[in-house]
Image: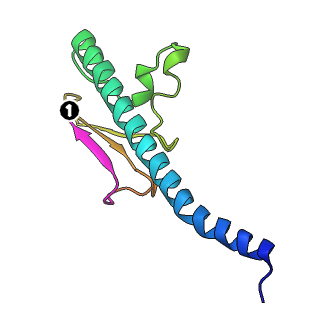
Amino acid sequence: MISPMNKIGIAILIISIPVLILRLNRFQKQYFEITLNKIIDIRLLLEAEKKYSGYYPKELAAIIRNNPLRKNIILDGWKNEFSYTLSKDSLNYTLISLGKDEKLNTSDDIKITN
């Protein structure tokens, strides 16, 4: 026989699991949105750098300069550094967020090229 307090505890546990799953899903969407916003900001900064110097910077960290407001711009929503690959002629680049699983070339990667 289950006591009334145990029944309440079981009911709370049963209700808590779907709520927790929904909250985790919402947080993943937030990380994705943060990452997309940072990609847009990075792209604008990279384009400004190319307009100024004629080519994209060799390292992504160059867009930070000495601006403390940009110190975390090279980190995606999951706090991982973006993968930035520059073409040999420095006229094109690939920018990749490794996504939730933190592994390159998987389905959750967010990738742009220029």
Answer with the quarter of the image where residue 104 lies.
bottom left
Q: What stretch is highlighted in magenta?
A: 105-114
> Residue shown at 45%/39% (left/top)?
76
Task: Identify which amino acid the numbered label 1 is placed on.
Answer: Asn
> Residue shown at 49%/46% (left/top)?
27
The answer to whether residue 5 is above or below residue 75 is below
The answer to whether residue 89 is above or below residue 47 is below
Residue located farthest toward the top when viewing the structure as drawn: 52
Q: Is residue 43 magenta?
A: no
Q: Quadrant of the C terminus?
A: top left
> Residue shown at 49%/43% (left/top)?
80
Residue located farthest toward the bottom when viewing the structure as drawn: 1
Color style of the picture: rainbow
Camera-side residue of 72 and 5: 5
Answer with the quarter of the image where residue 105 lies.
bottom left
Camera-side residue of 36 and 113: 36
Q: Does the magenta stretch include residue 112?
A: yes
Point out residue 77 in the picture as x, y percentages from the top left corner. 46, 40
* Residue under pointer 1: 92
